[in-house]
């Protein structure tokens, strides 16, 4: 496709970062953009499935801990588990989700509908200190196969789980907003690298396995091959301009 025509479709500012990353080579810029889309498509399917699994695991865990099936509604009531200033973010997320359901004239009292309405950021925050404590410090039970803590430098605890989910959440948001996941910007310079994206993808696979879910079987179901994902990453990294020592 002609670069100028493609630029009209997508806008100059959107393509400029790709152009800058390949030293103004228009053919490579278009190729880099196409690879970024391919990589995003592959990863978003995995993230979407991971998100559903994560929320269901958390939901089941809290229902077991609290003995309350409709715990999301209970959590925002006076005296509920999120009725305190430290859990205000999650409380507001639930209220916002209920309002959206009501505006669409859907049943805002349905636990299942509310469960599906809440975004990834909400589930990630469930492992922040306040929410983790409010839910009885029980949520690590969703990952029974996580590694045992063996050193003083790495603890596979709630804080670690929260950081891992943050990586995935950030990748998800970049893809959802059609941002690049194959470059990073340092100062005024844009450089090609898929390292951060590859690490986030590996984090997804690790957490699935820690949750006692066969990540290989799941990828097979989604018709996604990790080799293909890493091949796309290799194609992207090969576009990085040579820099003399």
Image (spheres, grey):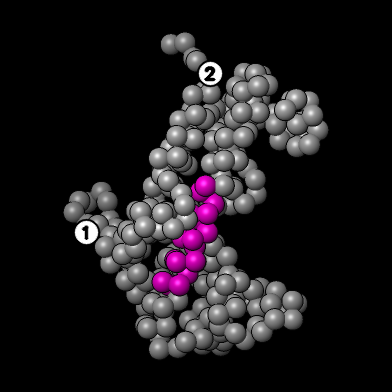
Q: Is residue 39 above or below residue 140?
A: above
Q: What element does badge 1 sit on?
A: loop
Residue nearest the observer in this picture, 72 or 43: 43
Alpha-carbon neighbours of circle 2 within 10 Å: few (<14), some, or many (≥20)?
Answer: few
Q: Is residue 236 above or below residue 133?
A: above
Q: Is residue 102 magenta?
A: no
Q: Which mark is residue 241?
A: 2
Where is residue 222 shown, x and y percent of the image? 47, 55
In primary-sequence order, the first of circles 1 and 2 is 1
Of the 4 image quadrants, the one containing the N terminus is top right
The range drawn in magenta is 42-58
Residue nearest the observer in this picture, 82 or 200: 200
For the point 32% across and 71% down, which residue is it?
141
Q: Which mark is residue 220?
A: none
Q: Is residue 43 magenta?
A: yes
The dominant secondary structure in magenta is helix
For the point 47% across and 87% down, which residue is it?
69
Alpha-carbon neighbours of circle 1 within 10 Å: few (<14), some, or many (≥20)?
Answer: few
Q: Which mark is residue 148?
A: 1
Where is residue 7 shown, x and y percent of the image? 76, 31
């Amino acid at each position: 496709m002609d670069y100028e025509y493609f630029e009209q479709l997508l806008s100059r500012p959107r393509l400029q970062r790709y152009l800058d990353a390949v030293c103004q080579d228009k053919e490579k810029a278009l190729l880099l953009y196409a690879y970024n889309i391919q990589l995003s498509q592959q990863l978003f399917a995995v993230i979407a499935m991971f998100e559903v699994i994560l929320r269901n695991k958390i939901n089941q865990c809290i229902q077991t801990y609290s003995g309350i099936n409709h715990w999301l509604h209970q959590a925002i009531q006076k005296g509920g588990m999120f009725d305190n200033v430290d859990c205000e973010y999650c409380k507001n997320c639930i209220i916002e989700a209920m309002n959206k359901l009501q505006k669409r004239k859907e049943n805002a009292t349905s636990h299942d509908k509310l469960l599906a309405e809440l975004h990834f950021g909400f589930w990630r925050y469930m492992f922040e200190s306040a929410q983790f404590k409010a839910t009885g410090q029980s949520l690590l039970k969703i990952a029974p196969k996580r590694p045992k803590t063996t050193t003083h430098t790495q603890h596979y605890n709630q804080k670690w789980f929260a950081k891992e989910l943050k990586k995935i959440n950030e990748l998800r948001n970049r893809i959802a907003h059609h941002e690049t996941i194959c470059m990073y910007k340092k100062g005024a310079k844009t450089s090609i690298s898929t390292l951060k994206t590859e690490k986030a993808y590996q984090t997804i696979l690790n957490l699935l396995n820690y949750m006692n879910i066969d990540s290989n079987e799941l990828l097979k179901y989604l018709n996604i091959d990790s080799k293909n994902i890493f091949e796309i990453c290799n194609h992207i990294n090969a576009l990085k301009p040579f820099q003399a020592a």
